[in-house]
Image: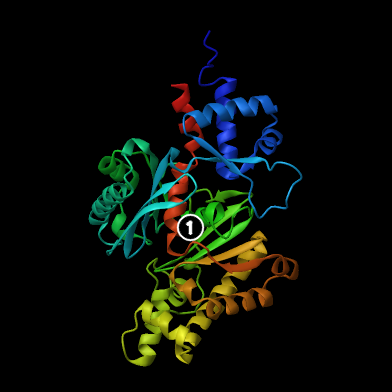
Amino acid sequence: MNDELPITGARYSNRVRLLQALLRHPARSRAELGRQLGLSRATVTALLNELEQVGMVEQQTADEDRPPAIGRPPLQVSLARDAAFAVGLDFGHRHVRSAVCDLHGGIVADQWAATEVDDHPVASLNLAERLTVAALAEARVDRSQVIGVGAGLAAPVDSTGGEVHADGILSGWDGIEPAAELEQRLGLAVQVENDANAGAMGEHLFGAGRGVGDMIYLRLSAGVGLGLILGGRPYRGVTGVAGELGHIPTVENGLICRCGNRGCLETIASPVAVADLLSRSRGERIALPQLLELVRLGDRGARRAVADAGEAVGVAIAATVNVLNPALVIIGGELAAAGEVLLGPIRAAVERRAVVPAAQAVQIVQGALGEHAEVLGAAALPLARAPEALASRLAS
């Protein structure tokens, strides 16, 4: 007699719940899974045996870093890395990156190319297709193994319909539907997300924010963007515009920003703005890699330019810390490579300007994922559907 339940039945539901638990908390013992899911040991064992036979989960001995236990160490269960894959795309203002990621958030293959994304949407989408094809070939992953594609774009994205609010932010993309365009090119399901939100998800799931329920991710790249994780979940606002910190006016009668306002934080604190400022003071063109090298070598002008940007960022972050009271602020993007020269002034401004309980509760750290935060966060969008996709394979 076939005891397989329909896809909506208890067995399917338990499979999904177990796979979800392993996706969020890898390396769990059977006892821990049973307690977490409220299932008997026999049920957990039966489910794991079933999933292990088809290569969806794997077992290993307990982590050596844990305190030694009396008797035989328990086996720990994790999702099999190669049970499924996802593709992450990162559309920066000046680059496109494509990465194939496994279920542990490991990058199996990574392709990158410089391009002017803002004014050339079709060329950028075509480039994303070529990079993705190359990354899949490099990883030796067939498209049938790919759950889907996540794409981070440097513009607000409506969380309900996926509409990109390009006007004033990414004006060359007006009228473009990136998800539909990419699906047509790649033949895979595509979800689009704001790049800073993607970076926040990447650091939350795989980096410095792992296990932190309330955190902020600030991307200091060609633009300045803020991603929010509140209550353990991404927060986007009603129309996907939450976190546009880079377009908060900071300098009275300052430079005109690409959004149309004057003196936005982005005009003084993005890596491009800091490098331009130093270029004017030195009378020579300074690119971002040179800026970071000058900071490393202790150049006073470069360090001052970065520290001033950090001060401005800290003032804006202090207001956000007062409003949201997060446990963690993660600084990412290219300028984060300046390290303490940037982070020190940010921390000082937050300590000085945020209310004491909020300032004392928050940690401000450099991101752990570097240039891969956004592409990993983008891949996390389809990876979040991995439990249902894997469980459905067994039910079919």
Residue 342 image position (x, y, % from top left): 53, 77
For the question of whether residue 195 can be seen, the reply is no
Above or below 119: residue 264 = below
Please rate how many residues cluster around mark 1, counting C-alpha atoms within 10 Å: few if below 14, some from 14 to 19, many from 20: many
State the scheme by which the image is colored.
rainbow
What residue is at 27 percent from the left and 48 percent from the top?
A: 133
Residue 256 at what x, y percent from top left? 39, 74
Q: Secondary structure at mark 1?
A: helix
5 to the left or right of 89? right
Q: Is the residue 386 above or below the residue 91 in the image?
A: above
- Residue extending farthest to the top is 1
Q: Position of residue 127 (x, y in %)?
A: 25, 55
Q: Can residue 44 be seen here?
A: yes
Above or below — where is 297 with respect to 270? below
How many numbered marks does the figure carry?
A: 1
Residue indicated by mark 1: 199
Residue at the spot 33% in from the left edge and 43% down from the top edge: 141
- Percent across and percent down for residue 23 are 55, 42
- For this rendering, which residue is in front, 218 or 68? 68
Quarter-wise, where is residue 10 in the image? top right
Identify the amino acid type marked 1.
Answer: Gly
Q: Is residue 122 left or right of residue 268?
A: left
- Residue closer to the observer: 319 or 56: 56
Quarter of the image with the C terminus is: top left
Residue depicted at x 59% and y 75%: 346
When the figure is inspected, residue 77 is found, relative to residue 7, above or below; the finding is: below
Q: Residue furthest front?
A: 71
Give whichever of 56, 159 is nearer the camera: 56
Is residue 171 rendered to the left or right of residue 196? Answer: left
